[in-house]
Image (cartoon, rainbow, N blue to C red):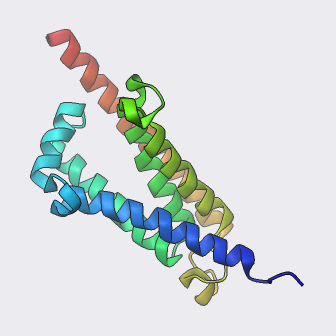
Amino acid sequence: MAFPYRKDLGLLALRLGVGSVLVAHGSQKLFGWFGGGGLDGTAQAMEQMGFRPGRQAALASGLGETGSGLLLGLGLATPAAGAAAAGGMAAAVSVHAPAGFFAESGGFEHPAFVGCTAAALGLAGPGRFSLDHLTGHVLDRPWIMAAAFTSAGTAAYLVISARMRAVREAEQSS
């Protein structure tokens, strides 16, 4: 006989894994945990990557990763959490894309994988073992999913476009 909660357990495991990765990366940016630069170090790095102003970009990135990771792990507001994580990872992909695909050469493999997985969770839903399920899916509605992915996509486009302009301007001035 088939185990009736198999998919729900799989979604829980996936949410906890991806959520943990996002929380860890966000904590590096915000607090300097796990060998990260903290807000000041991340702000400097963001400026060098073309995200301006760097401190606001570091704070937004750190909060976005930490917050979306926590929400994904809990299975709360799953469409919004998945969309937010995917949007943030799109910006990270734009930074790493010139180095190619594989992470060993500085490529975009890792942020692409995390972003795609978060997006898939946002689209698939959190499963039975989640706060969304416990609350009757109040924050997991089709219109929320559409609004979240539209907003995250638009925000990612605007952030990446602004970064690309800053990078081009820096190249022209040097």
For the C terminus, the image quarter is top left
State the residue lying farthest toward the right.
1
Q: Residue at x 45, y 55 (%)?
A: 85
Spot occupied by residue 109 in the image (x, y as percentages of width and height): 47, 39
Q: Residue at x 19, y 63 (%)?
A: 33
Examine the image and state in which quarter residue 53 appears.
top left
For the N terminus, the image quarter is bottom right
Spot occupied by residue 135 in the image (x, y as percentages of width and height): 58, 88
Q: Residue at x 28, y 54 (%)?
A: 60
Examine the image and state in which quarter residue 29 appears.
bottom left
Q: Is residue 128 visible?
A: yes
Q: Residue at x 32, y 63 (%)?
A: 24
For residue 39, side relative to residue 80 (left or right): left
- Vertical position of residue 124 compared to residue 134: above or below: above
Q: Is residue 53 visible?
A: no
Spot occupied by residue 34 in the image (x, y as percentages of width and height): 22, 61
- Vertical position of residue 146 compared to residue 105: above or below: below
Front-most of residues 128 and 84? 128
- Vertical position of residue 128 compared to residue 113: above or below: below
